Image (spheres, rainbow, N blue to C red):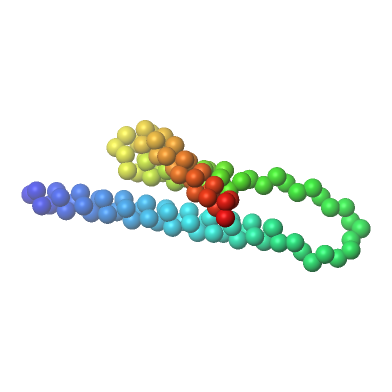
Amino acid sequence: MLAVACNREIKEREKKIADLQYSLDSIRLEAQKAEAEQDMVNKEPDKEESTAPVAPQKKKISNTAKGAIIGAGVGAVTGAIVSKKKAKGAVIGGLIGAGAGAVAGSATEKK
């Protein structure tokens, strides 16, 4: 009976880990897409003489802020999944995720 309970608990934890890994992979993919889009935006088009006025560029969000936003979302989802107290787990996970995401974004900016 104890072995059955342990096996069920192990399978539940493995499922949680697989869900977390899926979330992380999704975030990495979205970050790569955003980086590719950012690279496309940052590339200057071939300069040809034009008399058309140039519209002012929008202020871009920093990589630190992007990382914090993504980290907060993933942390909140992860915290809610892992914790028995869903709301508390989501808040704590969101805070930790935001901090980790901000650090990762800051490191990206320094490159």
Residue lying at the far left of the rendered structure: 1
Determine if residue 12 is in view.
Answer: yes
Left or right, 40 with reference to 69: right
Query: Which image quarter: residue 65?
Result: top right
Q: Position of residue 88 (x, y in %)?
A: 37, 33
Image quarter hosting the C terminus: bottom right
Position of 86 relative to 16 (above/below): above
Which residue is located at x 16 percent, y 53 percent?
Answer: 7
Residue lying at the far front of the rendered structure: 110
Which residue is located at x 9 percent, y 48 percent?
Answer: 2
Determine if residue 72 is in view.
Answer: no
Q: Position of residue 13 (x, y in %)?
A: 26, 50
Q: How many marks?
A: 0
Position of 11 relative to 98 (above/below): below
Left or right, 53 with reference to 2: right
Q: Position of residue 80 (x, y in %)?
A: 37, 40
Which residue is located at x 27 percent, y 54 percent?
Answer: 14
Which residue is located at x 54 percent, y 59 percent?
Answer: 32
Q: Position of residue 109 (x, y in %)?
A: 58, 51
Left or right, 71 with reference to 40: left
Query: Which image quarter: residue 36?
Result: bottom right
